[in-house]
């Protein structure tokens, strides 16, 4: 018992000594304690971060915004209400609302035409009034009005449209207009600041800012026969009315045409998509020069390389466009490309997906020669390829049925019997174009183009291809009442 008491006493004395030592340290060594706190606090690091990244180094977008709003216009359009294929069009419904449901009327009732009103944006690209916008903004328009930033208003003419890229070119009669210069969309980097300029909800001259969040994005909204999608994705706010407006970089250069958003509500929810300037500029220049887009084709069916393809081909990276097939007598097959090759570059520009391949090839014209980088049997190779057009050669396509500005359909058997004709192609609807300019009306049945009988849209295409580009085009046919008419259309060349 005495032993236990002795241990307890020793422990009490030791504990008291420790408490006393702590008291003395706290009283006479407070400076060291403050030093320790200062060394472990994050204040020093925070100050260092602020000094390294001052607020002034954020991009100054004021000059780019001021320059852009002067060259971006408000476009108002009047068009026939669409009861056909546009009823389910994502682009049409987003910007103009769903089509009006039809109704049954008694015999002899003549329904007055119904018009839909829409609005969008456009970008002035030349001082004499050429304006680039989206095809879906002016598609089927019967009247186009352009309002400038200074509130002047002009009637506009649709020069040409390309549903494959959703680009259109319109023209107003004016001079000395403010313009935006084309930029290099290929040089855009992820995270780079951009501005979206347009007229959302009829709020004119609206500027929003964001960053490039992805490139070469395909979202499946184009409606052309050979759709080309390779969008610039940004988080700049875009809403109905922005369509056709400018996407500009921090220097105020035009790097894209704002086209669509990803949204379940119909309004902006985080992502917007713009057509790259490299594609838009090529389309516009072709329309101005030829009246028709000169689409260059590589002659391949491809898909983006996925994990299974990468493993099967023993690739180091899951990148590139896998060649599923090559078209007979196409540019790729003639140059030696084969099924199973992996295309990884065009003229030194990396190709990481099928949409990126479309974008790179889309910058060129038939007859242009490009260097294609590809992987075969684990080896990286290059080959020179001469691109071809939709006809399979390298000539310039000067006219096509699409440039006539009309939608065509078959003639019913009942009308053939009533009019005593064997073929023909009926004009279903008219937009701005050569047929409308010549005076052709909806319902007219085209029977001959340059004395060549036609029964399908493809027949019209073939007849136009055989035409001399420097001579007028003769269109012959019947009105719905059976009256014969002919129209002479001015050539492009």
Image (cartoon, helix red, strand yellow):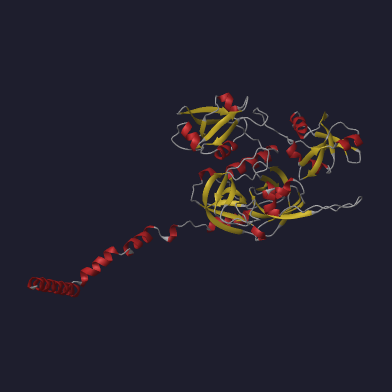
Instruction: Say left or right for 378 vs 265.
Output: left
Tally of numbered tags: 0
Residue found at x 63% / y 57%: 265
The C terminus lies in quadrant: top right
Point 49% across, 48% down: residue: 190
Where residue 277 appears, x then y in whole percent? 58, 45
Query: Is residue 55 toward the left or the right of residue 38 in the image?
Result: right
**Residue 469: percent from the left, percent from the top?**
74, 32
- Front position in the image: 384 or 236: 236
User: Can you name the residue that lies furthest to the front here?
Assistant: 1
The quadrant of the picture occupied by the N terminus is bottom left
Residue at image x 49%, y 57%? Answer: 60
Q: Please indicate, yes or no, whether residue 171 appears anywhere in the rendered image.
A: no
Q: Observer-nearest residue: 13 or 360?
A: 13
| Residue furthest left as drawn | 2
Whether 261 is drawn above or below 328: the answer is below
Q: Percent x, y for residue 97? A: 71, 55
- Expressed as whole percent of the image width and height from the top left, the position of residue 330 reads 61, 27
Q: For residue 5, what is the image quadrant?
A: bottom left
Q: Judge by depth and name the residue closer to the eye, 21 or 445.
A: 21
Q: Is residue 214 above or below residue 403?
A: below
Q: Is residue 15 visible?
A: yes
Using the rendered view, name the quadrant where residue 119 is placed.
bottom right
């Amino acid at each position: 018992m005495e032993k236990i008491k002795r241990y307890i006493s020793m422990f009490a004395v030791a504990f008291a000594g420790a408490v006393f030592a702590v008291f003395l340290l706290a009283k006479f060594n407070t400076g060291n304690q403050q030093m320790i706190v200062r060394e472990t606090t994050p204040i020093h690091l925070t100050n260092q971060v602020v000094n390294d990244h001052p607020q002034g180094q954020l991009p100054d977008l004021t000059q780019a915004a001021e320059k852009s709003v002067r060259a971006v216009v408000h476009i108002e359009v009047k068009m026939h209400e669409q009861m056909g294929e546009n009823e389910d069009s994502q682009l049409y419904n987003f910007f103009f609302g769903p089509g009006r449901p039809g109704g049954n009327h008694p015999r002899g009732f003549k329904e007055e035409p119904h018009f839909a009103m829409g609005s969008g944006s456009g970008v002035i690209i030349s001082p004499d009034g050429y304006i680039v916008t989206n095809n879906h903004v002016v598609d089927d328009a019967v009247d186009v009005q352009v309002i400038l930033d200074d509130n002047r208003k002009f009637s506009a003419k649709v020069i040409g449209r390309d549903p494959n890229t959703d680009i259109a070119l319109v023209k107003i009669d004016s001079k000395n207009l403010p313009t935006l210069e084309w930029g290099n969309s290929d040089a855009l980097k992820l995270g780079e600041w951009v501005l979206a300029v347009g007229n959302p909800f009829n709020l004119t001259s609206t500027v929003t800012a964001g960053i490039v969040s992805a490139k070469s994005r395909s979202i499946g909204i184009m409606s052309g026969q050979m759709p080309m999608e390779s969008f610039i994705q940004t988080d700049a706010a875009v809403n109905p009315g922005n369509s056709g407006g400018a996407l500009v970089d921090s220097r105020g250069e035009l790097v894209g045409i704002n086209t669509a958003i990803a949204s379940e509500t119909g309004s902006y929810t985080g992502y917007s998509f713009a057509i790259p300037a490299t594609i838009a500029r090529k389309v516009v220049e072709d329309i101005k020069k030829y009246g028709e887009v000169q689409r260059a084709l590589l002659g391949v069916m491809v898909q983006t390389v996925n994990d299974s393809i990468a493993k099967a081909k023993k690739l180091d990276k899951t990148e590139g466009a896998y060649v599923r097939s090559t078209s007979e007598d196409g540019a790729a097959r003639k140059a030696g490309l084969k099924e199973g090759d992996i295309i990884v570059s065009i003229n030194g520009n990396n190709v990481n997906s099928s949409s990126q391949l479309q974008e790179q090839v889309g910058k060129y014209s038939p007859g242009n020669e490009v260097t294609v980088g590809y992987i075969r049997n684990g080896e990286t190779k290059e080959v020179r390829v001469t691109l071809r057009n939709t006809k399979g050669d390298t000539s310039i396509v000067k006219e096509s049925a699409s440039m006539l500005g009309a939608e065509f359909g078959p003639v019913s058997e009942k009308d053939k019997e009533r009019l005593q004709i064997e073929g023909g192609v009926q004009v279903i609807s008219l937009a701005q174009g050569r047929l409308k300019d010549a005076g052709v009306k909806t319902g007219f049945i085209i029977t001959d183009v340059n004395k060549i009988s036609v029964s399908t849209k493809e027949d019209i295409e073939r007849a136009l291809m055989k035409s001399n580009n420097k001579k007028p085009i003769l269109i012959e046919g019947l009105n719905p009442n059976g009256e014969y008419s002919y129209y002479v259309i001015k050539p492009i060349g």
